[in-house]
Image (cartoon, helix red, strand yellow):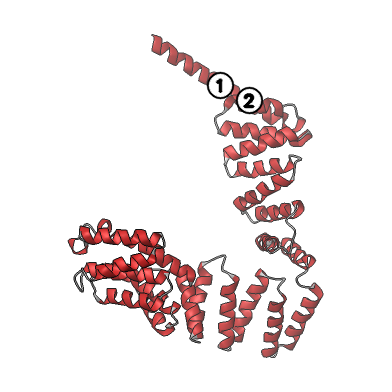
Amino acid sequence: MKLALIKIILLSMLLLSFNAAWAADSEYLLTEKTYKALSEAQALMAEDKNSAAETKLKALLGKVKSGSYEMAVVQQTLGYLYSSQEKYKKASDLFQKALDSKALPKKVSHDLNYNLGQLLLADGQYKKGIALLEKWMSSEKSAPTNAHVLMASAYYRVKQYKGTVKHIGIAIKRDKSAKEAWYQMLLSAHLELKHYKSAINVLEKLITRYPYKKEYWNQLAGLYLQQNKEFSALSVKMLAQRLELGDTKTLMNLIDMYSYLRIPYKSAQMLKTGMNDGVIKTNLKNLNDLADSWLAAKETKKAASVLKQVTALDSSGKADLRYGRVLFDLEQWKSAQQALSKGANKLGGEQAGQAFLLLGMTQFHLNNLPQAKNAFKKATGFAKQRSQAARWLQHINNRLTEQKSDKSEATQAATG
């Protein structure tokens, strides 16, 4: 709820610029005196001088016309002040008065309804908050994901679990990186509704994402028993015991299994999660394995991000060459040039030849023809790269000759 309130406070800073936003309509203009007083109150709020801001805003309430646009703006601003102090009842009362006046622009009223709904929930007025937010959502083309999470939580509080399932389900579908807590809320709601098959589906997703968390395996076994599927329940329990869930070796076995089954994206996800959670060490081997999985899953940018970490752990130059090759594929020429230069200077043998050849091609894409020529010359010193590098050298020399000729003609034309 605190994040929602932060958004309310941030919105207040935007809503104080009414003159600029609504200058096209004289109905929504503040007098210079009111605007100045509001700006001063805003400045006090920004400095956490809330008592002084409150005094100024209360005084202003007595000076503006009742039911007017100016009155609504002052009420709204004072409401934001109270919300920042967690005085939710006072804040919601003022927001409601501002809305009841029907003096605010339609868009501002719409946004204020959302903020009021949040405040009502923060104040424990769940039914009123839910009703208001449902009305607000009906006027939204596509409510943000966090609004659906908020609604799901509110419905759970009042034990209206169907509402929880509906809204948290929408949030999970929209967000590929849906939080574990969202799945847990969905699971709890299904269990409360005795929707055991749906709960099993949620648990299977949780196990895929968090295979080393034993509680999900135990819950799944319990649900199979609930459905009179004794054999399935026993299989899950035996698997959990055999895998020694929570152990690094267990997770690595599952990761290897996904790689073997040619599902590299899941392999990468599990490996990354294991590292983030501290179950798997973030070392050179595991980072290289993670890069392999991302590359196999065609997630080249994610692989590049991992390989950048690898270069800090590997001083041999091999990591620089590999990182440079991936950056080359992404056409990130400047970054590729830096990585390949490092690799070429560290490596020997065939790998050095690969680095110089790629470096020459990278310099060519950067239109650094003299540097490209130098790299290709070095690449011709290696048997496997000699033929290709020689062809590139001929092409570079032709380009340089053309540029020299063009420059000469331009000079003659200028002096002619």
The residue carrying pointer 2 sits among few (fewer than 14), some (14 to 19) or many (20 or more) residues within 10 Å by Cα, namely many
Q: Position of residue 186 (x, y in %)?
A: 56, 79
Q: Residue at x 26, y 58 (%)?
A: 36
Q: Is residue 228 above or below residue 135?
A: below
Considering every residue shown, the one lying at the far top of the view is: 416
Q: Nearer the viewer, residue 320 or 49?
A: 49
Q: Nearer the viewer, residue 399 or 325?
A: 325
User: What secondary structure is marked by label 2?
Assistant: helix
User: Which residue does the numbered mark 1 point to in the structure image?
Assistant: 400
Residue 108 shows up from this direction: no
Q: Residue at x 63, y 81 (%)?
A: 200
User: What secondary structure is marked by label 1?
Assistant: helix
Q: Quadrant of residue 74?
A: bottom left
Q: Quadrant of residue 267?
A: bottom right
Residue type indicated by callout 2? Lys
Q: Is residue 56 above or below residue 239?
A: above
For the residues marked 1 and 2, what is the alpha-carbon distance in whole angstroms?
Answer: 10 Å
User: Which residue does the numbered mark 2 point to in the structure image?
Assistant: 373
